[in-house]
Amino acid sequence: MRILAIETSCDETSIALLESKNSHLKILSNIVSSQVKIHQKWGGVVPTLAKREHQKNLVPVLIKALEEARMLRKSKVTIKNSKLKETLVREEHLYKKLKKFLEQYQKPKIDLIAVTIGPALEPALWVGVNFAKALSYFWQKPILPVNHIEGHILANFIQNPISDLQFPAICLVVSGGHTGLILMKDIGGYKEIGETRDDAAGECLDKTARILGLGYPGGPIVAKMATKFKNQKSKIKIKLPRPMIYQKNYDFSFSGLKTAVLYKVRSMKPRETKKKEFIREMCREVQRAIIDVLIYKTLRAAKEFRAKSVILGGGVAANEELRRQFKARIRKELPKTYYLIPKTYFCTDNAAMIAVTSYFHQKEATKNWQKIKVNANLKI
């Protein structure tokens, strides 16, 4: 089986091709086009700009993905089908590009089209969904809607065999827009036991970076500054709160942490807040506070639910300090627990994770492409 997957949930335009043979999964291509530079001057993702960039990028990314998978074949046909245009009526620029592509290239040998339908930014999601629907119609291939959060969880099985996973599992999905704990009893069997009440961990990092004048995206910048900090040479000591860490629930709240950073900065003279020593110490303490909360709540959940596996996913899971500390704590406190975290490249949004997820749900694919819709607040 071959699956073509499309991911446009936020500011990455991504298309991947996956091949499965005898339960062995192989990623034939996974092309990601990032919009980071476009959104940097705004200090965050602007949904309308994200939508526009997806419209520009989808066809070029599709060509690259098919080319890398050695599935791009020249052809020559004339399209006079109004249904295709009707499907992309709100994506006129994309329609023109796609029509030209379909007239120049053959239908690839795929069995299924998968696409992210949520949760995420609705304008961005609709571009990918409409694109997938147009391909599904024209190529006469079934389509499968995929949950973005489940994609982050199952990204772990791009390279790890699913047979190694033991249930129940506790999954921590931590990214720019989502921070939550999920009890996983099987593939497709999920129960959300904790979620963010306000800012997700990634949002907190972005806002901290903005307050400190470091730019966007905040996660990688804060992590880089934190690693430069040398505690033994610093006279600056900053202590920030660990929001909700000891509450009996498994919810998260990082808005207060961001506010604490803002109040600390405002309480100081502007010239003091611009010093590298202060910025590095603040980044180190913010990162440490977030990691403390994430690890404490995840391990407590693993113990309470007697989890046999702990799974991490999401963009913030690419943070090297988080990865290091999680591994050390699990070895110390839960040595018999199977621990999974994707390679850094597969933590951030990408279509390979959507392809893998669709593989496990392939029986749910439908030829009724007209009914596929976006759900920006989709739950797992």
Image (spheres, helix red, strand yellow):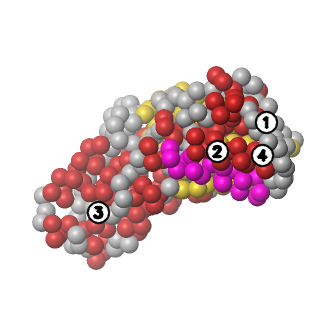
Q: Residues within 10 Å of mark 1 (few under 14, many from 20)?
A: some
Q: Secondary structure at mark 2?
A: helix
Q: CA distance from mark 1 to mark 2?
A: 17 Å
Q: Which residues are magenta?
A: 51-69
Question: Main structural element of the magenta stretch: helix, strand or loop?
Answer: helix
Question: Can I make out residue 138 in this image?
Answer: yes
Check disc 4 and report the residue beneath it: 103
* Secondary-structure class at tag 1: helix
Which mark identifies residue 96?
Answer: 2
At horizontal 69% and vertical 29% (from top left) the residue drawn is: 83
For the residue marked with disc 4, what is the amino acid? Glu
Q: CA distance from mark 1 to mark 3?
A: 48 Å
Secondary structure of the residue carrying tag 3 is loop
Q: Amino acid at mark 1?
A: Trp
Question: Residues under labels 3 and 4: Cα distance?
Answer: 48 Å
- Disc number at residue 182? none
Q: Which residue is rendered at x = 13% and y = 62% of the image? A: 268
Left or right: 295 in relation to 139: left
Q: Earlier in the sequence, mark 3 or mark 4?
A: 4
Q: CA distance from mark 3 to mark 2?
A: 40 Å
Direction from residue 284 to residue 336 in the image, left or right: right
Residue 139 image label: 1
> Picture quarter containing residue 21?
top right
Residue 42 image position (x, y, % from top left): 35, 54
Nearer the N terminus, badge 4 or badge 2? Answer: 2
